[in-house]
Image: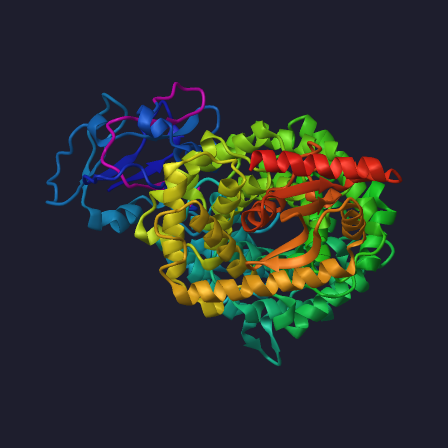
Amino acid sequence: MRYALIKKRDFAVQPFVLTVCTYSRSLLHEIIFSKVPKYCMMLLHSPPAHHSISMSTGASACYPSPLLRRSPLLRHHTSRLSRLSRPSRTQGIHLLPSTSLVPCQAKRSSSSSFSGGGKKGGSSGSGFSLDNVDKLLAERPELRVGDRNNKAAEDRRRSSAPFKTGMSRKPTLMESLDTVEMAASPSPAATADMLYHLGDALKREAMYRQLGSMEQTRVAAAMAKLSDLLLEEQGSSKRVEQLGGKHLSLSAWGMGKVGSKGIQVSTRLGDAFAECALACPSMDGPGAKGKGWLNWANLLYSLAEAGVVCSKSKHVQAAFDTAVNNRLLVEGQKCNGQDVSNTLHATASAGYAGNLEPLVSAVAGDLTSVMKSASAQDWSNTIWALAKHEEMKAGRLGPGLPIILHDGLAVTSDLALRGAVVPQNLSNILWALAKLGWKGDMSVVGILASALTMRAANSNPQDASNTLWALAELGWYDASTYSTLISTLVQKVRLAQPQALSVAFLACAEAQHWESNVEELALLISKQSVQQWGQWNFQTIANTLYSWAVLTAVGAAPASPSFARMAQQLFSCAACREASTVNFLDLCQLYLAHQVALFVALPGGGLSADQVLLKACAKSYEAQQQKLQKQIRCSASLEQELAAVMQHAGYDVKRDIVIGREFVQLQVQGAAVRVAVAENYFRTPQGLLKGSVVLHDVLAGWVCKGSVIISEAEWADLQGDPQRQQAFLAQHLQQMRSKV
C-alpha cells in the first residue's frame, strides 16, 4: 500500500510529503479522500507506479502512466481533489512517488517507512515510522482542522454538524459514511441530512463504478444506524415524528437510493415516513412554500424505490391515497414534469390499486404548463407508468390517458429525431406502447426504433430485448433494426439474463427473422456452462424452445447445428424441472416444440426421455385446443360462409375438428383451411404473417393433407360474387397440392 499525507502549500516552497510503500499485484482500485481540507489521505491499491500524479494551478502537470490515465476513477477523484483543495493561483496539491524523494536517513522499519522530501531534486527530510503519525500531527497542529489540538472536539463537531443540503460541495460516499459512523447523538434534522447525503453520494458514485463488498457492508451498517436513530423513542414520540415536510421528503429520498442499489433497508422506517407524512402539515401546507407536490412526489417515489409496497402497509397505502386524491390536487400546488413523472412511476412500482382518474385528468387538463419543461426521461417514466396501470385492466386512468400519450409521443419523437433520447427511455416508451395496444400512427414506432438502433451500442441487453419484444408485439418489422438489436445482445451476451435472451428469440420467431446474428446468439447459448444453464427457469426454457419450433417449422431457419444443439440442451434442462409448478402456457409451448422436434428428427426426441413431463404437456395442450374450438364456434361467421361456398361447389367440408390434438377450423377435401384476420398480420410491412399463426398452419398441414391460409381482406374483395369465390378457393387448394 502507499499512503500519502499531502499538505497544500505555495509551489515555490517544498511541499510536505509522507509516503509508506509496500508492493501489491493489483492495479489502481480506489482513492479515498478524507474530509480534511488542509490535507488528504490517499489510498492506492497498487504497486508504486513510479510516476508523479500532480494537480496544480498555474503549473505544469506531470501525469501518471497511460494505464492509470485511462481510469475514469482516477480522473473523477483528482477532479474532486482539485475542488476540495480550492487552490489559489499559487497553491495546489502535489503527490510525488517515493522514487522521486531523497532517501530517508532515518532507520526504516522492516515492513514500511515514511520518508519526507520535496520535488525532484529537493532536500531530504526526516524519517518517521508508521506508528508515529499521531505524534507527527501533534507536532504539526496546522495539519488539523477545527479545534486542531483536540481530536475529540473535532469528532464532536463533525457528528453534531453534518453536511447541509445547501452546501456548495457535495460529500463523497466515504465522507458520508465517516460522518454517519462518527455521529453520536445527532438531532432528527441532522440525521435526516446524513441519510439524504448518504443516498445522494451512493447514487453519484455508483454511476461510474461498482461498490466493493466492504463498501456495501459499510453502507448497510450506516443505513441500519440511521434507521435506528430515526425510529428511536424520544419522550412520548419517535424522533422521526419531529421532522418537517422537507426533511421527511429528503430523508425518504436517501433511503430510496440506498434501497435501489440492492442494499436492505428497514420497512419499518418506510412505514414511519408514510405515517408521519400523513400527519405533517408542512408536507403541503403553507410551510411547504408551494413545494407540496415536490415533497409528496419525492416521498412516494422513494418508498417505491426502496421496495415498500402498498399491499403490505396500511400507512403506505393511506399515504398514496391521500396524496393522489387530495393533497396533489389542491389549488396552488406547483409541480413540473419530474414531479408528475415520479408520482405516477411510484404508483405503478408500489402497486397502488386506487383510482387514478382524477390525477390523470388534472395533469391532462393542464398538460402544456405542467409538462412544459419535462425531459425525455420524465415523459418516458410517465408513459411507462400509465402502461403498467393499464396492464392491470382496471380502467382507473380515465379519458386523460390518450391526451397525455398523444403529447408525450409527439415530444419524444421530436427529441428522438434530434438524438436527444437515451436507449433506455426509448425502450421503455416502445414497451409501454406495446402494453397499451397502440393502434395509432406506426411512423412513431419507426422513429423511436430507428433512434434506438443508432445508439444500440450504448444500450444494455435488457433494453435491446424489451425493444425487440415491443416491436414484434406492435407488429413492426425491419430486418436491419432486428439485426442490430440482436447484434447488441451477441456482443453483450455475458451481461444478459436468460429472460432477455428468451424474449429476443420470441420476437425473432414472431417476425420469422433469421440471420447470422441470431445463429451466433444460439451458438453462444449452446456453449453455456452447467452453472449458467442452472439460471434458466421453466418459462425462459419454454419460450426459447417455442421460438426454435416456430423458426424451424416455418422454414425461416435453415439447417443450423448450433440452433439444433441449443434446442437439445434446452429439452434436457426442461426434463430437470418440476412440472407440477409450471405455468399452463409454458406446458403448451413445450408440447408444440416437442411436436416439431419429432417431425424434424431432432436428436434426443424432444421430451421423449421424460414421459411424465410429456404427458403433462400433452394434457395442457389438448385442453387449450378444446377451449379454442369452443371460442371459434361462438364467432365463426366467416368460416361458415367459406364452408357454404365450398359445399356448394361440391367439396367435402368439415368444420371445427381436432385431429391428433391439433385444432382445424376447416377441412376441405382433407386439407386444412384457415382464415387469417387483420390481427394475424404485422402492420409494418403489410402482408407479413406472424410466426405463431404460421406455426399452427404448418402443424395443421402435418396432420392433414396440407394447409391453406385465406386472407380476410382478400375474401372481402370477393363478396357478392360466388363464382369468383369458388375460383379463388379452388386456386389456393391447387397451389397447396402442387407444393405437397
Residue 212 drawn at (x, y percent): 37, 50
Q: Quadrant of residue 314?
A: bottom right
Q: Which residues are magenta?
A: 36-62
User: What main secondary structure does the magenta stretch of the protein show?
Assistant: loop
The structure residue drawn at horizontal position 83% and vertical position 37%, both measured from the top left corner, is: 723
Q: Which residue is more in the foreground, 699 or 21?
A: 699
The structure residue drawn at horizontal position 49% and vertical position 56%, both measured from the top left corner, is: 590
Residue 60: say if magenta: yes
The quadrant of the rendering that contains the C terminus is top right
Residue 572: say if magenta: no
Task: Give left or right: position of 424 versus 58.
Answer: right
The structure residue drawn at horizontal position 78% and vertical position 44%, both measured from the top left corner, is: 649
Determine whether 564 is above or below 297 in the image.
above
Task: Give left or right: position of 335 versus 265.
Answer: right
Determine whether 376 is above or below 451 in the image.
below
Counting labels gives 0
Asked if one can make out residue 582 in the rendered structure from this viewpoint, the answer is no
Q: Which residue is more in the foreground, 39 or 278?
A: 278
